[in-house]
Amino acid sequence: MKIYSALRSSCLLGGSLCALLSLPCVGLGQAGVDILGSPIPGITAIGHHAIGVNMSLLAVDRPFSERQWRTDAETDSLSRRARRAMRKADRLRFMSGFEGGVVLQTPLLNGTKLVDAFGSETSYNLADRRALAQSLANNTTSAQVDLRWVGWSRHGSKGGWAWSVEDRYSATVKPTLALAEFALLGPAASIYDATLLSDGSVVPVDSLTNEQFEMAEQGISNGPLPLVNTLLDGGSFAVQHVRSYGAGFGLRLIQSRALTLSFGLGAKYYRGTGYYEVDVENQTAFAAFNRGFGTELVAEGATLGSALRPSGFGVALDLAVRAEIAGLWFASLAINELGSMDWQGESYSLQNPVGDWNSWNETQGGVLDLLNQGLSPTALFLEATPERRVVALPTRARLNGGLRLGNRAKVGVEFAAPLNQALLRQPTEIGIGGQTRLAGFEIMGGWRWQQDNGIRTPLALIWAPKGRPGQLGLATGDILGFLEPERRWSWGWSYTRTLSAARGL
């Protein structure tokens, strides 16, 4: 298995990159936890975690602090200096240096050893590989990594504001059965009629045994092999990397024991590194990426400046309103990512691909060659036309409500749904859960139903001892994920600090 031994560890990824420019894209859903690990982000997001979720929370929820009620009579009886000192003492800053979340959904985690599956040595026999190929073709493989490099929020008596810098890497893959078999079986894939063994004999693909599979050298076809775009027809691939700079504020419009009404507004500025889209009806593809997006830091012929220069820019608004009754019941509505991205890229014709499958031979490097070219679409298409494309961001609505239980706990429900058909949109979700403090820990948990992914049980545990500024959190998108890791494996982590009495701000 000469070339196929080398391709075994990268062919599936490389072939999926081909599908990127020749097949429809699909969306990627989050794990049901935000970057801190909250099971119901619109209810339990705190501080700068409210950016992109629900900005009105900046006005009513102080991170890891108990609520303090004061009447107008109490404050009116104080002198001007005393009221000013009270306002300063009530101020609070909340910050983090590095937080993140990882979501992975793939059949490769279903009773398999992920490292062995793509390592130089593997114990998988022919039947195992065929079953895994079928599973890859029937299920979507998705991955998402969220990184918050820095976040900061300031909370006062009338409201609060916050800002953050975040990165998001997203990808989804659903290969065709033929592509999955080619990646896992090489010369024993069903696109071939027979297989040449190392002893010189030729065996029909359907008759191969496990012992003969280890001797496979080359696939043989009695007729022409399918074209690349034909072989990939029916699969899907999407990939995107975006960095965002977000800021927002929450303001209390009405505040009393009977009613508290808050308003929130946020904005994000996006810098995009890669975007891919396909128009199947018109047989065209669109790709926008910077020169440093691929496997090499800097693509051939590119300067460092062109390698780091983003290919997309965008702006989005977030709106939120929240009401509380008697300090007990609450409800809010938020609309996130209302905006668009402007991408500078190139369009390609799906009717004019590079050659056929026979052109992907050993001397050209095959899929490895494609990887080394840094996702260059010219490896797939002969002609490119410069194009500027404006695409909508995945706008999303969140409606939630619930009940406060004292100053430390709350329970609630949330409904979240996409409002458009944008790339990498998140699915419809319904969540129910709560948040409480136990000893030195803040606990968040519940249940969350996600369209096409069933019910999950997110859980977050945050070490936040009273009187200490630091908080360390760990979360999972499903505490029962170990039962079915192939469809619900996700983790989040967070380290934050609470700074009180932010004088002079």
Image (cartoon, rainbow, N blue to C red):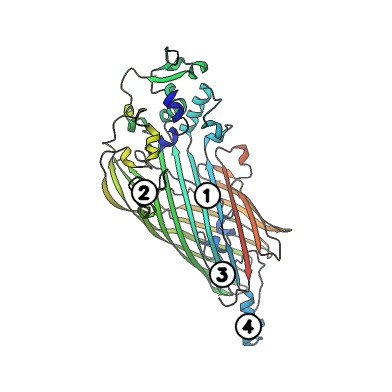
In terms of depth relative to the viewer, which is nearer, 279 or 449?
Answer: 279
Secondary structure beneath dot 2 equals loop
Rendered view: 371 above or below 167: above
Q: CA distance from mark 2 to mark 4?
A: 57 Å
Q: Residue at x 50, y 26 (%)?
A: 129
| Circle number at residue 429 | 1
Residue type, mark 4 in image: Arg
Secondary structure beneath dot 4 equals helix
Q: Residue at x 32, y 38 (%)?
A: 379
Mark 3 burial class by Cα count in 10 Å: few <14, some 14-19, many 20+: many
Is 179 left or right of 129, judged from the image as shown? Answer: left
Mark 1 burial class by Cα count in 10 Å: few <14, some 14-19, many 20+: many
N-term-proximal mark, 3 vs 2? 3
Q: Position of residue 328 (x, y in %)?
A: 64, 65
N-term-proximal mark, 3 vs 1? 3
Residue type, mark 2 in image: Arg
Q: CA distance from mark 4 to mark 1?
A: 44 Å
Q: Position of residue 254 (x, y in %)?
A: 55, 74
Between disc 3 and disc 2, the foreground one is 2
| Circle number at residue 466 | none
Between disc 2 and disc 4, the foreground one is 2
Between disc 3 and disc 4, the foreground one is 3
Q: CA distance from mark 3 to mark 2?
A: 38 Å
Residue that label 4 marks: 83
| Circle number at residue 291 | 2
| Circle number at residue 154 | 3
Residue type, mark 1 in image: Glu
